[in-house]
Amino acid sequence: MPAEAKVPASTARPAAQPAAPPLTERQEARRRRILHASAQLASRGGFDAVQMREVAESSQVALGTLYRYFPSKVHLLVATMQAQLEHMHGTLRKKPPAGATPAERVAETLMRAFRALQREPHLADAMVRALTFADRSVSPEVDQVSHQTTAIILDAMGQDDPTPEQLSAVRVIEHTWHSALITWLSGRASIAQVKIDIETVCRLIDLTSPGGER
């Protein structure tokens, strides 16, 4: 990978931009249509099947409008992943995991989410590829995916006020889950191996819990 070009200190950190105003109800509905169209196209043909013009036509918005919401296909597909995780989170809340320990509940939750993605392999591949391709311009969307994954894990733990150690464990679990998705999608890991890896990394939760093993 080529080294990044050095930039003057005065231009290295652009001034923070003011927060964008919240979307109106109509704009939210339009954004949901766009994300739904993106997911439908990705489900049929993966990353390459998601073409911005087709997304615009399917969601009945102008192409220029689509680009105002999502500047690129990568922005769009990362946002699609966040929406898919949000939907999974709602489903998981309706039927919480039944494990006896936080580690067991998180492992069960992540495997349920994994199996949901397994049912839509083209969509899963498109979203994971977008995360892999994302550069700094996609940081807000990537952060939303991370925050949603963290919320899913903390809910499964039953933890509202995690310690710094617990949050560190959650981050490692997120990294492992993401890596497991990549290795499964590339055919380098079986579902059985993914399950073992997820269960193994989730033991960090018990080790970082107050009074846990050291």
Image (cartoon, rainbow, N blue to C red):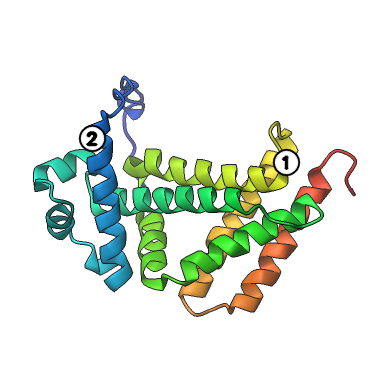
> Which one is in front, 15 or 211?
211
Return the residue at label 2: 27
In the image, is 162 to the left or to the right of 63?
A: right
As measured in the structure, the alpha-carbon distance from the residue carrying label 1 to the one carrying label 2 is: 37 Å
Q: Which of marks 1 and 2 is nearer the N terminus?
A: 2
* Amino acid under disc 2: Gln
Q: Is mark 1 on a helix, strand or loop?
A: helix
* Amino acid under disc 1: Gln
Q: What element carries label 2?
A: helix
Return the residue at label 1: 166
The label shown at residue 212 is: none
Query: Could you say where residue 158 lies in the image, as x and y percent from the top left?
Result: 72, 42
Identify the residue at image location x=74%, y=33%. 163
Query: Could you say where residue 164 lies in the image, as x and y percent from the top left?
Result: 71, 34
> Would residue 196 be visible to someone looking at this image?
yes
Q: Which residue lies furthest to the front in this view?
A: 94
Identify the residue at image location x=18%, y=61%. 51
Query: Could you say where residue 37 lies in the image, as x and y percent from the top left?
Result: 24, 57
> Which one is in front, 30 or 182?
30
- In the displayed structure, would residue 199 be above or below residue 191? above
Identify the residue at image location x=36%, y=25%. 9
Quadrant in the rendering for residue 77: bottom left
- In the displayed structure, would residue 37 be above or below residue 26? below
> Would residue 2 be visible to someone looking at this image?
no
In the image, is 41 to the left or to the right of 202?
A: left
> Which one is in front, 173 or 85?
85
Query: Could you say where residue 100 lies in the image, as x and y percent from the top left?
Result: 81, 55
Q: In which quarter of the image is the N terminus?
A: bottom left
Quadrant in the rendering for residue 106: bottom right
- In the displayed structure, would residue 161 be above or below residue 122? above
Q: Which of marks 1 and 2 is in front?
A: 2
